[in-house]
Amino acid sequence: MSADQPNGAGTAQVEDSNLDDILAEADTGARIPDDTFSRKVLWYTPLIWALYQLWIASPLPFILGFGVWNDTQTRAIHLGFAVFLAFVAFPAFRSSPRNRIPLLTWGIALLGAATASYLAWDYSGISARTGVPNTVDLVMAGIGMVLLLEAARRSLGFPLMGVALFFLAYVFFGSSEWLPDVVRWKGASFQKAMSHLMLTTEGVFGVALGVSSGFVFLFVLFGALLNQAGAGNYFLQLAFSALGHLRGGPAKAAVIASAATGLISGSSIANVVTTGTFTIPLMKKVGFGPNKAGAVEVSSSINGVLTPPVMGAVAFLMTEYVGISYVEVVKTAIVPAAISYVALVYIVHLEALKMGMKGTSTTGNVKFILGAIFTICVSIVIAGGTLFLAGQIVALADNVIGPMSTPVLVALLLAAYVASVRFAAQREDLDTSLESMQNLPPARVILKTGLHYILPILLLMYLLMIERKSPGLSAFWSSCFMLMILLTQDPLKAFFRRNGSIGDAFLHGLSEAAEGMIAGARNMIGLAAAMGVAGIIVGSVTLTGIGQVMAEFVEFLSGGNLLLMLFFVAVISIILGMGLPTTANYIVVSSLMAGVVVELGAQSGLIVPLVAVHMFCFYFGIMADVTPPVGLASFAAAAISKGDPLKTGFQAFFYSIRTALLPFLFIFNTDLLLIDVGPVQAIFVFIVALIAMLLFAAGTMGYFITRSRVYESVLLIFCAFTLFRPDFFLNQMVAEFETRPATEMYQLAEASPDGATLRVRMVGESLEGDPIDARYLLPLGPTGPDGATRLMDSAGIEFREEDGKTFVDNLGFGGPAEQLKIDFDWEVVEIEVPADRPPQEIFYIPALLLLGGVAFLQRRRKDRLDAEEATA
């Protein structure tokens, strides 16, 4: 029996009938009541929630002067909807009834909604009582916290609630003599804790819930509407039609389909169920075992969460925590996500070769690599050129027709939509059955049936990248466009086809639009609850200072070694991620560890951008969806494949090793995140990184041109490392920086070009009295009249000289230097400027020569094996 086959009765299989339960329990709620009243409540409440979110995102409240709430109030109402739906949609226990809502649950749900939204209804009074809450405030806050934790337990399981209870226990009992002195703090009273966590924006109603209410809901709603319109099935069939004829075609189609689904979904489990229902049976049909078929789908879906623009809602959190624009977050995420996906397609290709699969197109391995690189590079150039051209056209339109440019662009968009629907109406609608996937028309035919699904995505990208609108406003207008599509696509098709009733088609579209909004809102229940509970954890950290204690502990364990600390952060992320959703895991780990990694890197001489550390936490947080024994995505895939969930999880983890490698690489090579990288260099970085990742995949899979010997796999991985980190070898030979005396500070600042940075080494003491010896990058901005003015204007810092030494004399309030936690009277020991040394790319030459040697050996061996097989 193959190791990838089920083990019979002893295997922990998941029945197909449980598939819907897994998805419902994880995302939307497993309760389906029999009585009409309860069903109506579960139908109308999420619909009203979706309409409320669209209302507060629109300009209508300000135009009409009605329904205008401030940001804190909208967060409270947002949480009120989530808590209410968490109680009525999710049963309390596995034994609780699914077909009815108990009377007690109704009471708790209403109380939970009232306490969660209390901050909205008495906002002016609570604001007037800041710091001195009355009894009603404290009672509502206490009950609200308990019910929020219970709502999170129902919708997400106990682990997130357990982590929050741990931090709350430290808040209230942190002064206990049972605790070691190093972690003990003075403790907080009930009044202080509730005021901090439930009545201000430091806790539950903080940044995370604000992002959930302002950005995430609208993007999830946009994805749900797009899927309801039929885009999910369209992308899936398009991928199958384009790739199904290749070796292991269904598996390759699964990867591409999951990438497309990831554009509109932030849930790996929903991604598995949406695409896996079709892809996994077809993978099994062409020869993949159940566990490998499920693992391919899980790995694809996990990578879907990495894919911009949604990125499991983390993209929007990152904008707030890191302080960069949404466009910058997308830019940093695009190369790692792209090379990870291409490498997964290549892994599937290698699996097909190892199993001797055939396709109607027998693409060779080297040709596959070159073809993939060429196709993606051309796609990137076309996409970049299109965005640039669109920006130029819009700028020209603004100059020529001024304020009329927006109505003209809207008219062009509507004309393109009507034309694409007319195009689609000339062909039959796509079949959604599994049988239809096995006999699809050519990809060009399928492409023409859903061009109107691409328009909302293009609109979203246009608003974000060219108009530079806020993510919330961009998602709002894109969602409005999707609602229009849902309402009109069926009537337009009926009109163009001259069959069917246009009125009936419109009513069907109205129903589909409502169902899409309900699906989007129900998908947000657990996520909104998670954001609220994550606020409790973050608020506890800021109130108690436990983050610094944990950071010092991890720093102690790592011995000050940055690589070892990163390993500990990865382990913490994976462990927490086994019970926490991706967003909550990211919030907790980044809040505790991101700053520490940056500080330790600075002390080690490596200046790590904050966004790189946050991406590191994000990547390892999603790995928990794969990792046994909890990985829910693996259980969902096993339910479809009839495989073993644990074996599926381990196989998926093996396929995802490349995803776990990337965070370590972009910490030490930030070019992968396109930080300070121009367009031409970005293409070069992408090509080199893609080749390196494909070589790493070949090395770990034990197959390149033919089956690899152990030393060949090691050499392939070594080549990949050299391409990823050529500076590693150069740094061993020649120092990266040369030092200059601190007294040359102003001369160097004055002579530096526009946008340069000054790398300085400083020593001093922290506020806690700990010694500091670290490097900092001071931004210089545009050239100025002199170095001193330039440093103050751009970096917010001034220096003084005493006895031949240079000290920090002044810090601009809120400036870059203060944000770097530089303090007064720190001494500048030296300035580090780039050394004159050979380019690091010189090490690509021996790496490629070594690769050529491995390819030569494998090609000669493959030719010999082919000849022996032909004569046998």
Image (spheres, rainbow, N blue to C red):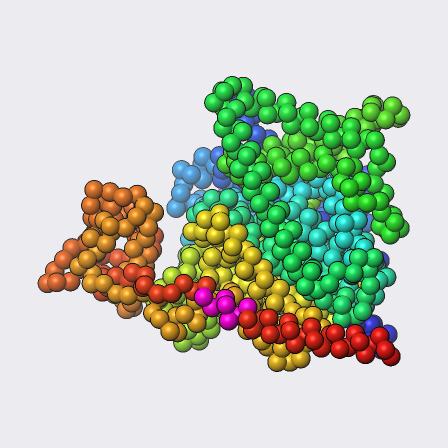
Q: Position of residue 580 (x, y in %)?
A: 60, 60
Quarter occupied by the N terminus: bottom right
Asked if one can make out residue 252 in the rendered structure from this viewpoint, the answer is yes
Segment colored magenta: 842-848
**Which residue occupies 70% across, 53% down?**
256
Which of the two residues, 696 or 152, is positioned nearer the viewer here?
696
Predominant SS along the magenta part: helix
- Whether 693 is among the magenta residues is no
Instruction: Point out residue 540 in the picture as x, y percentages from the top left corner.
Output: 46, 57
Residue closest to the eye, 481 or 755: 755
Identify the residue at horizontal 54%, vertical 29% (top origin): 393
Residue 37's place in the image compared with 405, above or below, is below
Picture quadrant where residue 111 is located: top right
Examine the rendered structure and indicate whether residue 704 appears above or below residue 212: below
Residue 147 pos. (x, y %): 60, 51
Kindly identify the residue that appears in the image at 41 percent across and 63 percent down: 839
User: Is 845 a magenta residue?
Assistant: yes
Which quadrant of the rendered structure holds the C terminus? bottom right
Left/right of residue 759 with respect to residue 168 in the rendered view: left
Question: What residue occupies the far left of the structure in this picture?
Answer: 803
The image shows a total of numbered marks equal to 0
Q: Between residues 619 and 534, which one lies in front from this camera angle?
A: 619
Query: In this view of the protein, which residue sits in the foreground, 224 or 81?
Result: 224
Query: Residue 508, how many percent across, how many down?
Result: 81, 31
Q: Quadrant of residue 765?
A: bottom left
The picture quadrant where one finds residue 640 is bottom right
Left or right: residue 281 compared with residue 374:
right
Q: Is residue 765 visible?
A: no
Is residue 134 left or right of 862 when viewed as pictured? Answer: left
Picture layout, residue 296 above or below residue 706: above
Q: Residue at x 64, y 39 (%)?
A: 457
